[in-house]
Each structure stands twice: as structure tokens, then as C-alpha cells.
Image (cartoon, rainbow, N blue to C red):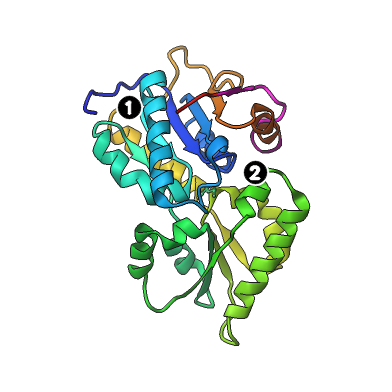
Amino acid sequence: MTSSVTAIGPIGVFDSGIGGLSVLGALRKELPHEQFVYVADAGHAPYGERDSAHVLRRSQVLADYLYSTHQVKALVLACNTATAAAVASLRQQYVNLPIVGIEPALKPAAAQSGSGVVAVMATRSTLESEKFQALLAAQAPSVRYLLQACDGLATAIEQSDRLEIEALCQRYVQSLRQAQDGGARIDTVVLGCTHYALAVDVLSKAWGPGVALLEAGEPVARRTRQVLKEAGKLQERKAHDAPHDSATDSLFYTTGDPAALDQALKDWLLKPMSHQATKLQLP
Ligand code: DGL
């Protein structure tokens, strides 16, 4: 699609579920005069344990919905798994639409690790993707990366299943610790799935002191600002120059259960609750 995009219009944001709210929080802070349309594809989640063809297809359906129905002026893939499977193809398809993806923060982790041992927690699909393998191959060989596919963790977070979240975090942290294999200790952990940022309290406890957890919401928000500015589409001020109105700046849709997204909005993004999620019927 080649039609041009105007500076007026919302920014589309999607994820397989609630994980992208961790990115949306950073976007709303970085871009206080923009409006957002968020879609949680919870009816077709988890992405991380499905094949990449499924994730590509879903990303295309969501991008098409956001572009055609909401005339978004930019798109943020607030999902590492969707970025790995679909960002290249979406950029080819929507040539005039600024598209920002998210990927595990390997380089920033290397820069801040003192021990030179970095753990990467992500979905199986992200870790097995060509995009991630290329990112890994491009890192300095002086840093050791230990990879952990965290099957089930995004689903447990999506379902707010606290016991399961704690059990899985314990299991995966233990498995990464074993992988240290008597060598230097992990001191930096990359959260390579946007859902995991919502469980940062449980993960911090499981890792204990002296281990930094890195997520990529803020860098993605800064990158989105830069891309919008370069494209002449940044809304520096609203027409009437008012500050952000949290009751009207975002719309929320889900292909799953709206009550679950409402609860997540209350827990993670908006206190007090001022938005309501709408059920979306998509192919
Ligand atoms: N939040 C998504 C990510 O960043 C994946 C969650 C899922 O498996 O659906 O990779």
C-alpha cells in the first residue's frame, strides 16, 4: 500500500495480548500529544509457541485493521515475536507508514554487564527466528549470551495466574543459573517478551539482588518519536495546546475477552481506570 499518511491520526500499537501495555506506557510518556489505538490479539495468542506463519498472518490482519479502520499514521509492533516474524514484510507492504518494532536489548545488555554473562528470556518463536539469530551473531564475541525459551510464561501473565507466574519464573531462572556452568555469573537479564515486563517484580525476586533486568519499552518509545519526527508526522502539541487527557488519548480493542484487557489496563496502565476495551471481530 502506497497512499501517504498524514500527521493527524493515531498511532497503532499491537501485541498478542496485554504485554504491549508495557510499551504503550512508555509511548504515552514519550509522546504526550499523540493518540493511540491498541489491539490485543488475545483470541489468537500466545504467539510465542506458534509457527511464524501464524504470527505473520495475524500481524497482517491487525496492521490492515489499524490502517484501514483507524487510518493510523504509524504502527508500533509492541511484541518481539511479531516483530521477528512480520516487521520486514509489513514494511514492504506499507511503504509510507512508519513502522517500529521491538527486539531483545542484547547490545544495551552487553554494554552494562560487568560479568560479561547476559541471560535472554524470550518466547521460543523469537529465539528461533532468523531475525534474532542474526542479531545474536552481530554481537561482540566477548559477551556470553545464555538463552531461555520461557514456554507458558506469557500465557500465565495474560491470565494473571500468580502461582503459575512464580513457578515458571523460578524454573527458568534456575535453568539459566545452571547454564552458567561454574563460569562467571549472569548479572544482566534481557526481557525479550513484552509480557515479561509486567512480571518484573516476580522476576526481580527470583533473580535476587545484583542482577539488572532490561526491557525495551523506553527505547522503542524514543525510536517512535524519532521516526515520526523524520517523517514530519510528530504531534508536538494538540491543536488547543492542552496536556494529555488520559480519558481520550487511547482506544483499546481485543480479539479476546474485553474484561481481561480492562483488568490489565487498571493494573498496569491507567489508575484510576478511565478506558474500556471493546471486543473486536476480525477474520
Ligand atoms: N508479548 C509477545 C512478545 O513480546 C509474546 C507473547 C506471546 O507469546 O503471545 O514476544
Magenta run includes residue 105:
no
Residue 236 location (% of width, % of height): 41, 26
In front: 107, or 4?
Answer: 4
Check the image and report above or below for 150 versus 160: below
Q: Residues within 10 Å of mark 1 (few under 14, many from 20)?
A: some
| Precedes in sequence: disc 2 or disc 1 | 2
The residue under the point 39% across, 40% down is 57
Q: Is residue 51 left or right of residue 175?
A: left
Callout 1 secondary element: loop
The residue under the point 63% across, 73% down is 175
Callout 2 secondary element: helix
Q: Which residue is mark 2?
A: 158
Q: Residue 233, which numbered label?
A: 1
Q: Is residue 82 left or right of residue 94?
A: right
Residue 252 location (% of width, % of height): 56, 26
Q: Is residue 214 left or right of residue 158?
A: left
Magenta run includes residue 270:
yes
Amino acid type assigned to the residue bearing label 1 in the image:
Lys
Locate the C terminus by quadrant. Answer: top left
Res 210 seen here: no
Query: In 3D space, how far apart are the residues under numbered discs 2 and 1 (Cα atoms)?
Result: 33 Å
Amino acid type assigned to the residue bearing label 2 in the image:
Glu
Residue range highlighted in magenta? 267-279
Res 90 seen here: yes
Locate the N terminus by quadrant. Answer: top left
Q: Is mark 2 within 8 Å of ligand 1?
A: yes
Q: Residues within 10 Å of mark 2 (few under 14, many from 20)?
A: many
Check the image and report above or below for 252 versus 192: above
Whether label 2 touches label 1, CB < 8 Å: no
Total marks placed:
2
The residue under the point 60% across, 87% down is 182
Point out the residue furthest to the bottom here: 182
